[in-house]
Amino acid sequence: MYQILVILGVIGIVYFLFIKKKPLITNKPKNKKKNETPKSNEMVECAYCGTYASVDECIISNNKYYCSDECVDKA
């Protein structure tokens, strides 16, 4: 009986040390303020189609970023 308990203990230790995955602790950056304007090299999402484009290439209409004139017309 003692041998069975030792084997189960070893299996339990191996499971908790090597097999069971621990949750990863990530430091998420704080959300940007809405009034903060993006930098020129930053990528923003198109308000219509969801495509990411550089701020330099985007079209701003009604305080929203669009990737092309077509998206502005459709929105």
Image: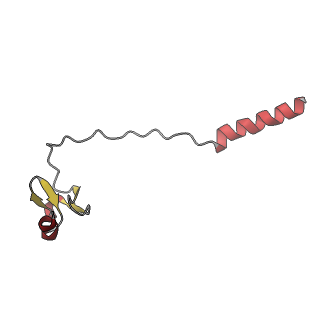
Q: How is the image coloured?
A: secondary structure
Q: Is residue 15 left or right of residue 33?
A: right
Q: Is residue 5 above or below residue 71?
A: above
Q: Quadrant of the C terminus?
A: bottom left
Q: In the orientation shown, which residue stands out farthest toward the right?
A: 1
Residue at image location 13% in from the left, 65% down from the top: 72
**Residue at image point 71% right, 35% down:** 13
Of all residues shown, which one is farthest toward the bottom?
Answer: 70
Q: Is residue 53 above or below residue 20?
A: below
Along the line of sight, the residue nearer the viewer: 74 or 45:
74
Q: Residue furthest top?
A: 2
Say how many tags the image has.
0
Q: Quadrant of the N terminus?
A: top right
Q: Going by the image, does 62 lie left or right of 34?
A: left
Residue 51: image x %, image y %?
26, 63
Q: Residue furthest left?
A: 62
Name the spot of residue 32 as percent of width and height, x first.
23, 42
- Asked if residue 66 is positioned above or below residue 12 in the image, the reply reads below
Q: Is residue 29 above or below residue 64?
A: above
Give whichever of 52, 47 is nearer the camera: 47
- Indicate the position of residue 17 as horizontal and vertical percent values: 65, 38
